[in-house]
Image: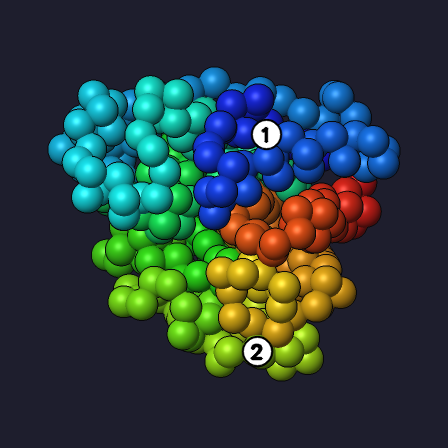
Amino acid sequence: MLKIAYHPCYGHPVRKDHRFPMDKYPLLIEQLKYEGTIEEDNIFAPVEVEEKHILKVHTPEYWHKLKHQEISYKEERRIGLPMSPALIKRELIITQGTIDCTEYALKYGVAMNIAGGTHHAYSEHGEGFCLLNDFAVAAQYLIDYKGFERILILDLDVHQGNGTAEIFQDNNKVFTFSMHGANNYPMHKETSDLDIPLEDQTDDATYLKILRQKIEELFSNIQPQFVFFLSGVDILKTDKLGKLGMSMQGCKDRDQMVFEKCFTEKVPVAVSMGGGYSPQLNLIIEAHANTFRIANNIYF
């Protein structure tokens, strides 16, 4: 069964003119149910993550500021979301959702978080709409509680996973791979274990050829025991915060490639949605929904 982490708090209220499309989360879950891709039994509501898991990858000082609402105005601007206890609670629930997805992926082969993919969260600060790094917390959970030693983070959001790269820069049990726009946020890139910067307007054929080659190399060289897939749909040509030239079909082909490889190699995969900022919300929903449709078709 495809298990999907979702909580009503994912659709956190923001200003109508805010760049982050919070409405996509409840609309996506409704679309997937309406079309019959999922049913209510597929969905589970996470609880808040325990502090001990956060402190494995984030500094006590940073967590203290989040917990006690002591983030400065400058730090809040860097994050890009107005601070509130409800926002922090949302981050805690999203992070636990990704941990839960690792458990379901071990059981079913794949599990997906409607939100998450908060790869711009560093060990000691947040930025780019990211406060806590859900993949980092969940990967460390697998290391600490499951004894995993070869974890692959496959970050295919249009923006580099700079926070994830920083957190795991000295951890040889987690391999960070980021394939992103070369000329996009963040302007200062961190060093992942493997970075593939793409030129503006990279098209489907070029993107997919590079990705196929790199996925084959990564699985051959690393032989991962677990994969985290950040399936951002901000690679679309229509995305207002991305600069690539990918079509909707190209985005689907990307997801198909990743899931087929994980399925064939029998490597569990946990998925978080990441970014999507096309001006038309229906395009964001359709692109994200495709990720769930493809996973469901391949695995179930």
Frontmost residue, 169 versus 278: 278
Quick check: 267 left or right of 117? Answer: right
How far from the left and from the top, in percent, is residue 205? 68, 80
Against 63, residue 204 (above or below) is below
Quick check: 68 left or right of 110? Answer: left
How far from the left and from the top, in percent, is residue 126? 28, 43
**Going 46% across and 54% down the picture, which residue do you hit?**
153
Given this view, does label 1 or label 2 mark the residue nearer the observer?
2
Spatial separation of the CA atoms under disc 1 and disc 2: 33 Å
Q: Is residue 1 visible?
A: no
Against 116, residue 45 (above or below) is above
* Disc 2 element: loop
Point out the residue furthest to the front here.
Answer: 17
**Going 31% across and 44% down the picture, which residue do you hit?**
79
**Going 36% across and 38% down the picture, which residue do you hit?**
81
Frontmost residue, 169 versus 220: 169
Point out the residue furthest to the right here.
Answer: 36
The residue type indicated by label 1 comes to Ala
**Going 67% across and 25% down the picture, which residue do you hit?**
43
The residue type indicated by label 2 comes to Gln
User: Are the residues flagged by discs 1 and 2 in contact, CB closer than 8 Å?
Assistant: no
Quadrant in which the C terminus appears: top right
Q: Is residue 123 visible?
A: yes
The residue indicated by pointer 2 is: 201
The residue indicated by pointer 1 is: 5
What colour scheme does the image use?
Answer: rainbow
Quick check: 268 left or right of 263? Answer: left
* Disc 1 element: strand
